[in-house]
């Protein structure tokens, strides 16, 4: 697609050809809540003096109206939009084909490409929550129209990884296809982070996830992962802050919780590289957590055996939840140490079934769970055994 024909904000691209001041209200913003965010202040280890670092922690929103016009194919069973991309009938920006780089994560050159000879690909999200490229001719004007004390242009890269062979859930995908998807996703994250750091961006939070089903935020029926790579260099959310503080506390006490705990009867499944358990303090009923047995900080540090082990763990956990009738709308949330942060982080993943929540859960960071984690684990272990559940 010629540069001058790219529509406004498709693939996160703003050009002199598609921008005018009337569109300023539609530029994605990252906006911090003045009442639930605060400046991050570190302290000098020797003097104890406060050291502001120009970043915040707390609640923020990505406000991106272009997300509202993206095709939605789940509830009404519209055509799978990824099919046209895979067959070369619709434009896309491909970052990786399988685990091999095809184009830059900052490319402004959408192409038509038949990729049916591949197992998985990673593309730039056509309807992203962030701006990925701003034409230098209009960047100054754009920033003047958008930015203030609590608001910045939401700058970053949104990736989508998908299998070439069609599947809808982690329960029906073939093991080798999920392995290929994860490899492609990991390779694309590596490409994006390297290119961002080559551009002088030193702090990079990376948020990989799956939205499976319409109630969990999935707008397409084909199973796919997404990655939000935040390049604003302005901080992180309150949950990530709590995770970082927790790992920092563990380090000061001389241990890693995930390396040392045995989860006290809550283990659901394990293979040679991963452990899956019913989490001690669930965010939803049947909330499962998993982590690699090796102490690694980021998803990009997984080796080939660990990627295969993760695919196995995700499939088995998903099929076990299906077997006991848990809602099939689910989120998979991958917590990875932000690049540029010094933390003895241990990578972990949450598998969270959809569930309606009440006022107390919206009022503060708490949940009211009806199922004890120990009972959840026992129920799922029994289902895995009785139904002979595996990833193959």
Image (tube, rainbow, N blue to C red):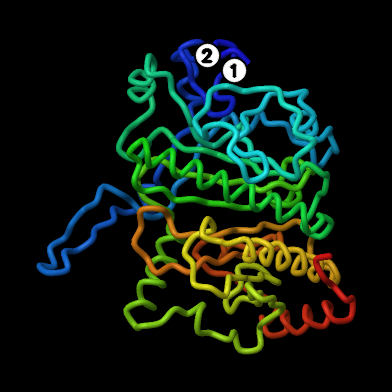
Distance from the alpha carbon under mark 1 to that under mark 2: 6 Å
Where residue 285 appears, x then y in whole percent? 69, 71
Locate residue 24 relative to residue 91 in the image: left or right. left
Q: Quadrant of the N terminus?
A: top right
Closer to us: 157 or 282: 157
Query: Residue farthest to the left?
Result: 47
Vertical side of 371 occupied by 357: above or below: above
Task: Return the mark for residue 18.
Answer: 2
Where residue 55 appears, x then y in whole percent? 30, 49
Task: Return the mark for residue 7.
Answer: 1
Locate residue 320 relative to residue 280 in the image: left or right. right
Where residue 290 appears, x then y in whole percent? 62, 70
Which residue is drawn at the image coordinates 34% and 83% (left, top)? 253
Which residue is drawn at the image coordinates 47% and 80% (left, top)? 257
- Identify the mark nearer the N-term, 1 or 2: 1
Confirm or deny contact between disc 1 and disc 2 (CB under 8 A): yes
Query: Residue farthest to the bottom?
Result: 264
Task: Return the mark for residue 149.
Answer: none
- Residue 201 appears in which quarter of the rendering? top left
Vertical side of 270 occupied by 391: above or below: above
Locate residue 378 relative to residue 102 in the image: left or right. right
Q: Counting other residues with Cα less than 10 Å from the Cα at mark 2, is it few (<14), some (14-19), or many (20 or more)? A: some
Which residue is drawn at the image coordinates 58% and 28% (left, top)? 11
């Amino acid at each position: 697609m010629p540069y001058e024909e790219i529509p406004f904000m498709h693939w996160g691209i703003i050009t002199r050809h598609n921008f005018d001041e009337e569109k300023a209200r539609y530029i994605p913003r990252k906006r911090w809540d003045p009442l639930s965010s605060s400046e991050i202040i570190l302290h000098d280890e020797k003097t104890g003096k406060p050291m502001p670092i120009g970043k915040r922690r707390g609640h923020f929103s990505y406000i991106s109206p272009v997300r509202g016009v993206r095709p939605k194919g789940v509830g009404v069973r519209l055509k799978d939009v990824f099919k046209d991309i895979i067959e070369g009938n619709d434009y896309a920006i491909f970052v990786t084909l399988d685990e091999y780089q095809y184009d830059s994560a900052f490319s402004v050159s959408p192409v038509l490409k038949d990729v049916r000879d591949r197992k998985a690909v990673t593309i730039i999200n056509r309807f992203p929550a962030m701006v990925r490229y701003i034409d230098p001719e209009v960047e100054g004007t754009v920033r003047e129209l958008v930015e203030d004390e609590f608001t910045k242009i939401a700058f970053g890269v949104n990736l989508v990884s998908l299998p070439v062979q069609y599947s809808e859930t982690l329960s029906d995908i073939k093991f080798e296809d999920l392995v290929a998807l994860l490899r492609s996703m990991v390779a694309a994250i590596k490409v994006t982070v390297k290119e961002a750091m080559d551009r002088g961006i030193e702090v990079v939070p990376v948020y990989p996830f799956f939205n499976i089903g319409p109630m969990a935020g999935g707008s397409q029926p084909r199973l796919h992962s997404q990655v939000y790579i935040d390049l604003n260099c302005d901080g992180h959310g309150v949950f990530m802050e709590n995770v970082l503080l927790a790992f920092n506390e563990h380090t000061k006490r001389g241990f890693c919780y995930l390396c040392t705990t045995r989860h006290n009867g809550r283990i659901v499944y394990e293979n040679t590289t991963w452990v899956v358990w019913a989490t001690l303090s669930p965010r939803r009923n049947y909330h499962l957590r998993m982590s690699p047995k090796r102490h690694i900080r980021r998803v990009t540090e997984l080796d080939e055996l660990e990627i295969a082990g993760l695919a196995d763990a995700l499939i088995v956990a998903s099929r076990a939840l299906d077997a006991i009738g848990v809602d099939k709308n689910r989120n998979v949330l991958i917590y990875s140490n932000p690049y540029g942060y010094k933390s003895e982080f241990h990578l972990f993943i949450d598998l969270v079934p959809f569930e309606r929540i009440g006022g107390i859960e919206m009022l503060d960071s708490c949940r009211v769970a009806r199922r004890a984690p120990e009972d959840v684990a026992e129920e799922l272990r029994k289902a895995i055994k009785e139904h002979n559940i595996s990833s193959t």
